[in-house]
Image: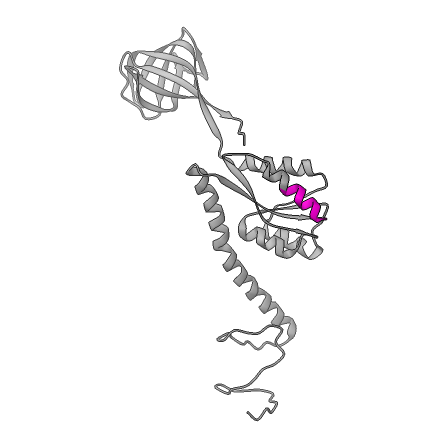
Amino acid sequence: DSQKRVKSAGPSTPVEIVGYSAVPNVGDELVELENERKAKKLSDERLEQQRQAKLAPVQRSALETLFNNIEQGKKANLRLILKADAQGSLQAIEKSLNEIESAKISAEILRQSVGPITEADILLASASDAVVIGFNTKVEAKAQPVVKREGVQVKLFSIIYELIDQVKEAMLGMLAPETREKVIGHAKVLQVFKLSSGKVGGSTVTDGRIVRKARARVLRDGVPIYDGGFTTLRRFKEDVKEVKVGLECGIKLGRFNDYLEGDVIECYELEKLEQTL
């Protein structure tokens, strides 16, 4: 109440401190340091810790949501932050993005504005797992170290159709790969051999070819009873990569040991299909 200036204050002494650059919260800790340089260093470290603590759950949530949606067959989402040189450019880009039709994935614009790419844009992208797109603009100098620190993807363009093509490629890259089975051959088990490592089906290739690096399933009366990779593929006592139609071989699949005469070994490959939007 006396409004007297003091050089120091002991425990439990009520004082009023002025000159803050920002208003502190009730309960905040006040730390005295030797000089302004050390005080700024400590302040920056604590602000960074607080920022990381806030961003971490948001980043995890964004990534988990993306992959959960893909696993559950839901529509995935590519998040974008758009910066451009003019409002007309933003409108043209938005129109082109909205014309991308896909039942699997969509492009969501979180923020769009005119001007250079700022630190705030990078932090938003980091927190929301978004890609920053710049059209006829640049990254502010003070935002460039933030881009590296946060690991945010920033793409700069001067031609709209190149921008749209890159967005489409990014959308395709987010989709889970699709595969298709291609049956490449069959073999029939003629005799079962017992070895120290387990049972082996002595077989003859009835059509196509049997390839060691492929996969195979055991069919009994037309019903699959095992599916796995090759442990052994031999011609006489020699390990081979492939056995063609009409030739005999010894086959062992994974840990399967229940071969019976007459079983059919169906060999197949998994072909990767080119994804489409």
Q: Which residues are magenta?
A: 86-94
Count of marks overlaid on the render: 0
Q: Position of residue 269 (x, y in %)?
A: 45, 21
Name the residue nearer the viewer: 62 or 84: 84
- Residue displayed at 67% across by 41% down: 92
Pick the front one: 234 or 10 = 10
Residue drawn at 56 percent across, 37 percent down: 171
Q: Is residue 102 above or below residue 108?
A: above
Which of the 4 image quarters holds residue 97? top right
Residue 163 showing in the rendered view = yes
In the rendered image, the quadrant that contains the C terminus is top right
Residue shown at the point (27%, 21%) measured from the top left = 258
Give the x, y percent position of residue 227.
35, 24
Residue at left 51%, top 75%? 29
Above or below, comparing residue 53 to residue 207 in the picture: below
Residue 186 position by quadrant: top left
- Which quadrant is home to the N terminus? bottom right
User: Magenta stretch: dominant SS?
Assistant: helix
Q: Position of residue 221 (x, y in %)?
A: 27, 14
Q: Is residue 225 left or right of residue 37?
A: left
Residue 261 position, x and y percent, is 27, 12
* Residue farthest toward the bottom in the current orientation of the protein: 2
Q: Quadrant of residue 91?
A: top right
